[in-house]
Image (cartoon, rainbow, N blue to C red):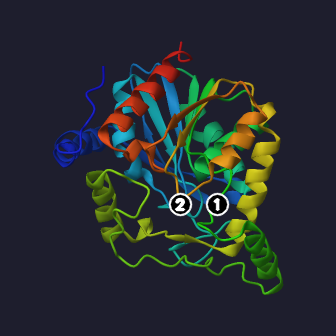
Amino acid sequence: MIDFFGEDDYAEQMNNVVLPFLKEHDEQGYFAGTGGIKLHYHALINPKEQAAVVISHGFCEFFEKYHEMTYYFYQSGYSVFFIEHRGHAYSEREIDDPDKIHCTDFNLYVEDLKCFMDAVVKEKSLSKKYLLFSHSMGGCIGALFMERYPDYFRAGVLSSPMMQLNFRGVNPIMVRILLIWSIIARWDKKYLPTQHGFDGVNTYPKCSAQSEARHNYLFEYRLHDSHLTTNGGTYKWARESFKGMKKAIADASKIKVPVMLFQAGQDTMVEPAGQEAFLKNNPAIIKKEYPDSRHEIFNAYDSDRMDYYNTVISFYEKYDG
């Protein structure tokens, strides 16, 4: 039984328990992604590994955001493998500006994940049994991966998966027109409207996390490490993401392994309609909703967060044998 951290003791637990644990167990390295791009990873090998959890993170994210989760998975008997997607954290970028998320083809994320599985996870995992955890943009990547490569994972979690972006009141037709115009205007590497570089301003509570302690923990990392300041997407990233989301929904029936999708009721980053379309195309996928949670359910208030972790770990335990 995992002793989950609350809001009040979070900083103490991270500093006195999790960070020393990571210092002892976290192995970092690089591998060659698609086209030879240099991608960074973290691996924590549990000597009593029941299975290996592979984490596919979200837009503008990095390993530090998953310190707590990594600790819980390890304490539950799992090794943890974390890929830093191209354009994120310490992985190589396709653009010079470190604050921009830019990708020339969404499929590259999927193929990078396969490179990671083949070059790192399969080589280092003790059990050779793999479980997927994916969040937001990483959820779209994870869904596409399971559709394309159905024999890698025993089961998968899609947490607030990016299947339709939330335009926050802007007419979707206008968005599509703007994206088409961005091709004509050659705006591929320009920021999307309302997006910008990292400005060092703490956005809590107007963010995707409800836990202030967790948000501030991550914010401190961003303030002191220029590799972690990715903050907005380019027009090219948006156009490619549209293609990726559309294909993930269309091919949902190709996923043959057990999958659980977690939906946040107060999500302002992605629309539930895309997730519902995905679920409709694969009725075997289990859905669990947290009506009061924001996009990052793993950074929700205590009751939702603890229930979420218990549910994820219980789901994995069904398929780690």
Query: How many neighbours does mark 1 have within 10 angstroms: few (below 14), some (14-19), or many (20 or more)?
Result: some
Quadrant of the snapshot with the C terminus:
top right
Amino acid type of the residue that numbered disc 1 sits on in the rendered structure: Ile
Dot 2 or dot 1: first in sequence order is: 1
Q: Amino acid at mark 2?
A: Ser
Rendered location of residue 193, percent (x, y):
61, 79
Residue hosting label 1: 37
Count residues near mark 2 (Cα–Cα under 10 Å), then give few for <14, some for 14-19, many for 20+.
Answer: some
Secondary structure beneath label 2: loop
Question: Which quarter of the rendered picture does the N terminus lie within?
Answer: top left
Image-based side of 244 in relation to 1, left or right: right
Residue 279: x and y, percent? Answer: 71, 35
Q: Relative to 211, does residue 51 appear above or below in the rendering?
A: above
Q: Nearer the viewer, residue 75 or 159?
A: 159
Across and down, in percent, residue 146 comes to: 71, 35
Kindly identify which residue carries mark 2: 91
Q: Which image quarter: residue 269?
A: bottom right
Report if the CB atoms under discs 2 and 1 are less than 8 Å apart: yes
Q: Residue at coordinates 62% horizontally, 68% vertically from top-left?
A: 169
